[in-house]
Image (cartoon, rainbow, N blue to C red):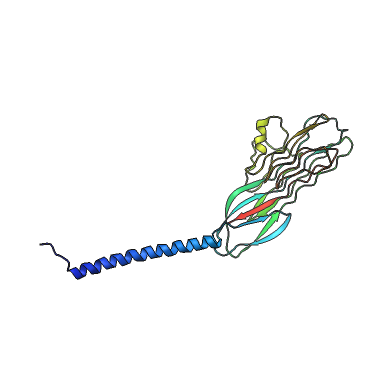
């Protein structure tokens, strides 16, 4: 005949199982309460640190952080500039956008100080006489051993196949094409190319995109908006706008 547990042993076994389930439920409730408390206190929000002014900074990695996500742009270059005396009628190029990294995971060590460098946007040059003034290059940005070069001078010739999503930074193609489809090369996940304007028989090219839109081609003294890491537009009779400063964004 099968062996039957005495009733007191059955009751003890049931109590043990119930107590075990209760312990698991209580543990889960405690964990849930802790998470909810952290959410209510804002402890689980994303931490984002932004450096967007040219210069060198120090960022100390917080305790408990071993990986950060990096978005970084080199500074934008300035567009070319000419006067009305300039007779060559081809497009006057906008500035190049800085090279960039897009949400790149980087291993870090808690408590360590890291150097952060934000590149300065290139200053536009005042045109003189019949000359075409080339827009200079923007400054490089760097963090965690990665360097994103600034947008190169507008005289730089870059192969069409060169891509702008790079680690470490690399040169960006200049805006010197006429086909709309080619302008896809001057977009980024964050910014679009600036608008080209046709003034006095001259195509004043817009700047390439960066962490914001490139500047528009202009023929007035008023400054146009140039996004961080983006190139400024070409200019007629005035110095081109300053390229967008670089930017470093750390998320953890």
Task: Work out whether 40 lies above or below 96.
Answer: below
Q: In this view, does 148 lie above or below 80?
A: below
- Residue 91: quadrant of the picture: top right
* Residue beneath the point at 86% across and 33% down: 86
Residue 48, percent from left and from top: 61, 56
Q: In which quarter of the image is the C terminus?
A: bottom right
> Can residue 160 be seen from the camera position used here?
no
- Residue at the extreme front: 40
The N terminus: image quadrant = bottom left
Q: Identify the residue at the far right of this view.
A: 129
Image location of residue 154, percent across then percent down: 76, 39
Q: Which quadrant of the structure image shows residue 212?
A: top right
Q: Is residue 212 left or right of residue 91?
A: left
Farthest residue, direction left: 1
Q: Where is residue 21 in the image (x, y as percent from the top left)?
A: 33, 63
Do we see residue 183 in this rendering?
Answer: yes
Residue 82 appears at what percent x and percent y? 84, 36
Left or right: 43, with 6 as reference point: right
Q: In this view, does 39 lie to the left or right of 216?
A: left
Q: Which residue is drawn at 72% across and 52% down?
A: 119
Q: Is residue 49 positioned above or below 138 on the image?
A: below
- Residue toward you, 141 or 203: 203
Count of number-bearing discs: 0
């Amino acid at each position: 005949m099968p062996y039957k547990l005495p009733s007191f042993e059955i009751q003890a076994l049931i109590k043990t199982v119930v107590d075990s389930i209760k312990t698991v439920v209580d543990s889960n409730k405690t964990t849930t309460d802790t998470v909810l408390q952290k959410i209510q206190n804002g402890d689980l929000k994303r931490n984002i640190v932004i450096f967007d002014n040219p210069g060198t900074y120090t960022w100390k990695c917080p305790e408990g952080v071993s990986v950060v996500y990096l978005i970084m742009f080199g500074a934008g270059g300035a567009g070319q500039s000419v006067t009305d005396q300039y007779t060559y009628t081809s497009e006057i190029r906008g500035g190049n956008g800085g090279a960039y990294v897009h949400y790149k995971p980087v291993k870090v060590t808690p408590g360590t100080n890291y150097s952060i460098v934000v590149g300065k946007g290139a200053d536009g040059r005042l045109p003189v006489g019949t000359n075409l003034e080339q827009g200079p290059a923007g400054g490089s940005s760097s963090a965690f051993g990665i360097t994103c070069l600034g947008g190169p001078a507008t005289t730089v010739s870059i192969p069409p196949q060169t891509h702008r999503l790079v680690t470490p930074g690399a040169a960006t193609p200049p805006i010197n094409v006429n086909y709309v489809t080619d302008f896809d090369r001057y977009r980024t996940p964050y910014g679009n190319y600036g608008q080209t304007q046709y003034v006095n028989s001259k195509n004043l090219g817009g700047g390439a995109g960066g962490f914001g839109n490139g500047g528009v081609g202009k023929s007035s003294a008023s400054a146009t908006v140039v996004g961080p890491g983006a190139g400024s537009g070409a200019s007629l009779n005035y110095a081109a706008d300053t390229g967008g400063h670089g930017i470093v964004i750390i998320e953890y």
